[in-house]
Image (cartoon, helix red, strand yellow):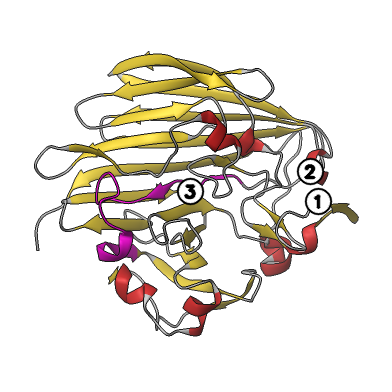
Amino acid sequence: MKLNVLKFGQTSFGEDVFLYNFSNKYIDIEILSYGGVIKSLKVPDRNGNFENVVLGYNSLKEYENDPYHYACITGRIAGRTKDALLKIDGIEYQLSKNNGKNNLHGGDKTLHNRNWQSKAEIVEGEGVLTLETFSPHLEEGFPGNVNFKVIYRINKNKVTIEYNGFSDRNTYLNLTNHAYFNLSGDFKETIASQDVKINAIGYGRVDEETLPISIEKEDLFIKMSKYSNLNEVLESKHQQVKIVGGGIDHPFILSKDSEYDVELKDEKSGRGLFVKSDQPVAVIYTGNFLEHTHNGICFEMQDYPDIQNFMPSKLKIYNKIEKYQQNTEFLFDIICKN
């Protein structure tokens, strides 16, 4: 494992942002101290050619003005919170409204667009990047003074992300990473030719605001626990495909009966991505509103979105005693030809 540290730029507040490059014979990854962004992630195709498989920008200014949440740490609450209202212990907290009348990904001034304290090291051949930041009580409306720690671990062909949150009072937390993957390599093609397998028991049907309203077990627009060609999904006439702009933007309730929760493969390049998490849900988004439509697919491993309205019995409260933790692994490998 090799580690190279570079200064990437300065934020609009004059803070130095660093780029951490970990590389070995399996993977070459760049991660920023700003937002914990995965700037690039290069893995080989079946011929050994290393190419980038994560959407990103070239400059810090672009990340500071990014409307798409490219490959960043996302929260305090990933996804949409209906009416931007969070109720804890009978108290209603008015969150910032940045998606119509709803709160999206915790607001506009939150974990994805700040510079985190960072420390990089190699421990027994494993690359480790530790990121820490503090979010004060009522930032973007959320309760609790929260210390966040996110750890990236790079070991052979696997990237693991560990999320931790420590609050001084009752609150709710739900973090994820918003990387857009495209296994074609350097984005030569859209994701349409790639195949996805979601090991799930059903998905969350969404309304016109992309808020989940019910769990559906039909598989008319995407097959559960079988590979589906993304082009067939993107061109589907299914009402749920149309309602989110032509594609997927849905939570999938994971079955947890397979080695991996989500799998993505690209037959042409031979690349495969295998995702495993301790979270119950994968929110999958096919980049329906990107500048270059369907140029990437997100696997947002997390708790139930809009949990207090969608699945209130599953709501977890975090405080001084109950710490927030989650763990997600991304493994890259070469697949066999059909």
Magenta residues, start to end: 175-197
The structure residue drawn at horizontal position 44% and vertical position 28%, both measured from the top left corner, is: 31
On the picture, is 292 further left or further right than 135?
left
The numbered mark, 2 or 1, whose residue comes first in the sequence reads 1
Q: Amino acid at mark 3?
A: Asp
SS of the residue under disc 1: loop
Label 2 close to label 1 by CB (< 8 Å)? yes
Mark 3–mark 1 CB contact (< 8 Å) = no
Residue located beneath label 2 in the image:
140
Which numbered tag is attached to residue 278?
Answer: 3
Magenta span has 190? yes
* Nearer to the camera, 114 or 250: 114
| Alpha carbon distance from label 2 to label 3 | 27 Å
Q: Which quadrant, please, contains the C terminus?
A: bottom left
User: Disc 2 marks which amino acid?
Assistant: Glu
Are dots 2 and 3 in contact, CB under 8 Å? no
